[in-house]
Amino acid sequence: MDVIALDSPTDAQIREWHDVLAAVHAADPAAHPLPGPDRTARLLGAGSGTRQQLWAVPDGGRFAAVAALRLPGEPGTDRPGEIDVQVRPSHRRRGLGRRLLTAAAEGLRADGRPSVIAQVLAGTPAVPFLESQGFECVLTLRGMLLRLDDVPPERISRLLAEGPAGYRLVRWEGTVPDEHAAALARAKHAMVDFAEYDGASWDARRVREMAATVAGRGDDLYTVAALHGDVIAGFTEIVVPHGCAGRAAQYDTAVVPEHRGRRLGIWVKAAMLAWLAGERPGVREIETDNSGDNPHMIAVNEELGFRLERESLEYQAPTPALP
Ligand SMILES: CC(C)(COP(=O)(O)OP(=O)(O)OC[C@H]1O[C@@H](n2cnc3c(N)ncnc32)[C@H](O)[C@@H]1OP(=O)(O)O)[C@@H](O)C(=O)NCCC(=O)NCCS
């Protein structure tokens, strides 16, 4: 079985790809609900917003395994590539995962990337697989879930009313308005404490690139920020996936160091929940990953009603360590 590169996948190849995801999803514990076939098509399509390379291993007209390597930013940047390998349960332990990783390693070298990251669930075969291929665990993430039916509306109104003096809330959908772009990039730096594995700096261009990636997939990005003068003191982002089946994803939340300790984090999150309740009533659950060494954010999420669901691990490998 050979690895083939999919430069611009055909409809039939996209269907096969989705079929591999569905087979893996049915057999393994999953962090997220299976995306619909049209979302898979968008993720693989040219409009996905981030450069990526795709490979598959065909076996008798079907795909036995697939891999996607996302390459955020420009070639040669320090930012790590992001790899995802999926092998049908019926085809495991035959070296297909390793062969796909070898193809991805060539892609990383050609793009001048120093390293690659992968996010996997604790306790799954992905852990021994990555550890056997030169990866090391760099971050433990607590996957938490908020069921909105379990959140009394009074809790949200109380938290909203408790907003600290001297701050005001702003919100936008999609790309950040120009007047807040530089301030949002500065606030994103506040997250670097918790994301040292990807410590690349944030600027207004990268903030817009992230929004374009989300929009390219057909997903909707919502942002709520607390302003102190013109400064974004804290913000939170939610992404509602295209064809949302009821579950939205928490993206970044941060409060800049000078403004911490004033309950701004829970305030912007409560404002987000109030906004979504009116704007996107179909959203019934929100999932989030918190770094295990970020007790403040975990406490904020627990106060809102998030509960622990699973543990995820971020693995990273320097490109030279790959097969
Ligand atoms: C993780 C995954 C991609 C591995 O694919 P695979 O084709 O079975 O892996 P390989 O056959 O190339 O395995 C290479 C080595 O990894 C290690 N490995 C892989 N699966 C393992 C397992 N279940 N238990 C222990 N070691 C394992 C072994 O050292 C193996 O070498 P060996 O078979 O000679 O002992 C596959 O299990 C999968 O698709 N899981 C679900 C999706 C997922 O979590 N993807 C990871 C995202 S990067």
Image (cartoon, rainbow, N blue to C red):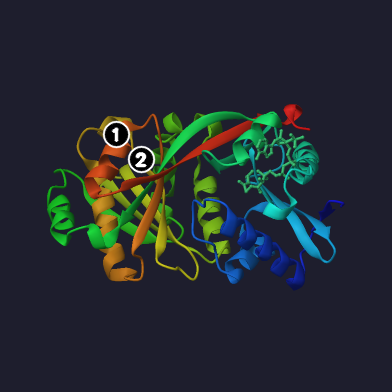
Observer-nearest of 241 and 221: 241
For numbered disc 2, what is the local secondary structure?
strand
Q: Regarding ligand 1, which quadrant of the image does it lie in?
A: top right
Q: Residue at x 56, y 56 (%)?
A: 213
Asked whether the viewer can see residue 151, the reply is yes
Q: Which mark is residue 279?
A: none
Vertical arrangement, residue 73 with respect to residue 15, above or below = above
Question: How many discs mark residues in the rendered view?
Answer: 2
Percent across and percent down for residue 45 are: 68, 64
The amino acid on which the numbered mark 2 sits, given as a three-letter code, is: Ala
Asked whether the viewer can see residue 200, the reply is no
Percent across and percent down for residue 53 are: 74, 51
Q: Is residue 125 left or right of residue 150?
A: right
Q: Residue at x 17, y 61 (%)?
A: 153
Vertical arrangement, residue 242 with respect to residue 143, above or below = below
Q: Is residue 193 left or right of residue 104?
A: left
Q: Which mark is residue 254?
A: 2
Q: Which mark is residue 296?
A: 1
Vertical arrangement, residue 65 with respect to residue 45, above or below = above
Percent across and percent down for residue 292 are: 40, 32
For numbered disc 1, what is the local secondary structure?
helix
